[in-house]
Amino acid sequence: MGTKTLLAYRSPEGRYRTEKHMIGNRNGFLIAEGVADGTLITEFDASGEILGLFLSEDKNTESVLRDFVCRSSQGIEIVVEAVKSYEKVALKATCIGCGKGGSIFREMDFADPGLVKNVPVVPLFRCTSCGKRYYSMTDEYLKTLVHNNTSLFSDEELEEKRKDEALFVKTLHEYIIRIFASKKISRVRTQVV
C-alpha cells in the first residue's frame, strides 16, 4: 500500500490548513497555527465544527502538523503549498440574529495567532454580518476535552463519566449552556454536510 499525500496550505501569517480528508469516520480538515506558547492543532468536521483542540509546546508549526497527521493517519504524507491568503473557517449555519447564512466564522481567525496566550477551551464563532457570537460544542469535542484534561475533574466526576459517559457529557453541556446563556452567547447549530 503506497503513501497517500495530504495537501496543506500555508498562509503568509503562518497558518496551515489541510484540504478535506477523513478524520475518524467523518470528512474534515485541520488547521495548525503558531500561538504564543507553541502550536495549536484544531480538527474540524466538514461543516466547520470543532472535533478537537491539541496544543503542543513545540513552536515549529509545520513539524507539529506533520507529526500529528502521521500519528493519527498512518501512511499519509503532508505536502505544503504557500498561498497568498488564509481561508477563514465558516460554519455551515444560519445566524439566528440576522438570518444570514455563511456569515459565521471562527473568532480565532480574526486574531494574530502568535499573540494568542490563552486558547479558548470552548470554541467561539461570530457572525460577520451582525456581530452575534456563538459557541460550538459537539459531543465528540467535549469527550476529547475531558479525556485530554482529566486533571480538571474530581475523582467523583471521573467515576460518573466511567459509569455513564453519555449522561456525563449531557450534564457538562447543561453547565456550558447556563454559562454562555448568561453572556448572551448562543450555541450554534450547523447543517449536516
Image (cartoon, rainbow, N blue to C red):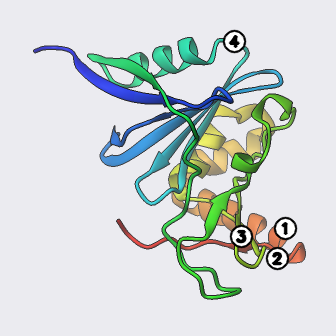
Which badge, 3 or 1, is on the more N-terminal residue?
3
Q: Where is mark 3, residue-wise?
A: 174
Q: Where is mark 2, residue-wise?
A: 181
* Residue type marked 2: Ala
Q: Nearer the viewer, residue 34 or 191?
A: 34
Classify 10 Å Cα crowding around label 1: few (below 14), some (14-19), many (20 and above): few
For the C terminus, which image quadrant?
A: bottom left
Which percent across, then down, holds residue 112?
79, 37
Q: Where is mark 1, residue-wise?
A: 179
Q: Tell me the distance, in whole angstroms, between the alpha carbons under discs 4 and 2.
A: 36 Å
Left or right of 32? Residue 36 is right
Q: Where is mark 4, residue-wise?
A: 58
Determine contact: label 1, label 2, CB under 8 Å.
yes
Identify whether 104 is placed above or below 87.
below
Give the residue at x 55% y 60%: 90
Q: Nearer the viewer, residue 8 or 120?
A: 8
Which percent across, then down, holds residue 191?
43, 73
Q: Tell me the distance, in whole angstroms, between the alpha carbons under discs 4 and 1.
A: 32 Å
Left or right of 190? Residue 112 is right
Which badge, 2 or 3, is on the more N-terminal residue?
3
Q: Could you say whether the residue bearing mark 3 is in a helix, strand or loop?
A: helix
